Image (cartoon, helix red, strand yellow):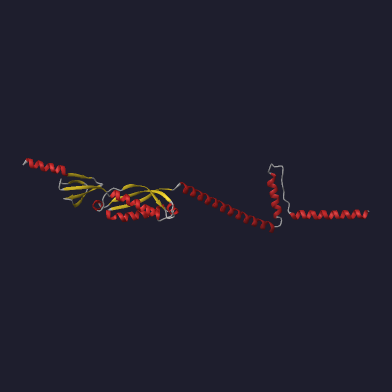
Amino acid sequence: MYILIGVIIFIILISIRQISEYERGIKFRFGKFVKIMKPGWKIVLPVIESYKKVDIRTKAVDVPEQDAITKDNVSIRINAVIYYKVFDASKCILAVERYQYAVGQLAQTTMRNAVGAVSLDELLSERDKISTEICKVIDEATDPWGIKVENVELKDVKLPEEMQRVIAKVAEAEREKEAVITKSKGEKEAADNLAKAASVLSDSPGALHLRTLATLNDLSSDQSNTIIFAIPIEVLQAFGEKNVGKAVNKVKDITKKD
């Protein structure tokens, strides 16, 4: 009697299995799925029963670098990180073999297909949008496996050195174009303002003279010994006409004396 009780106690002791809070246990009896075991101490009878633990925490898996070709035939290398968790422990064991490996392979294939559907410019400028599309495709494919894909992040996009140089030249050309456009806009605005100022000065009597005096006042504070002063052509013409008249009168006086 004591021997039988001892054997039963021994069997119970070796049958105790612990399931942690972040785990679920998949219990089999005679090779058939029985139930999902919750956290705590559980009895798994030897020989006739077995179980597998499944971690239901969110996992971050680094997707290795992949060679891919964009829609505009540019060869790149790209890698990513995928975040997923198991929401049905029984499916990830019964529906797929080695679900971690399967998710990684599916992520690589989906990532290459997504890159091949967009151009290089779209890949560089719309990385978040492409990541969301990849996440959606993988999540739909892994749903029958009891896996929820929470997020996919494209970590790095590596370009060939030749393409990097081309992109740098394009960026430099764009900056030069913006500089030329900005400069031309400034020159146009300056010309418009000068034209308006000239119109105001010409319409106001004495305004040009006041402007000339203001210019002389500014020049007087300069230490330079040489000052070039522009005189309106009308003034020079007036002086020229007066001198010509004087010369003509002198000639007439000389002729009379003779």
Which residue corresponds to the image point at 77% horizontal and 55% vertical from the top-left? Answer: 237
Q: Residue at x 14, y 44 (%)?
A: 12
| Count of residue discs | 0
Residue 110 screen position, x and y as percent: 35, 53
Seen as rendered, the residue at the extreme left is: 1
Q: Which quadrant holds residue 3?
A: top left
Q: Is residue 244 left or right of residue 172?
A: right
**Residue 159 pos. (x, y %):** 44, 48
The percent position of residue 155, horizontal first and vertical second, equals: 39, 48
Residue at 9% across, 42% down: 5
Nearest the camera: 92 or 160? 160
Does residue 193 appear left or right of residue 161 in this picture?
A: right
Q: Quadrant of the N terminus?
A: top left
136 horizontally vs 26: left or right: right
Is 134 displayed left or right of 179 in the figure? left
Q: Residue at x 29, y 55 (%)?
A: 143
Residue most toward the bottom? 203
Closer to the camera in the image, 199 or 101:
101
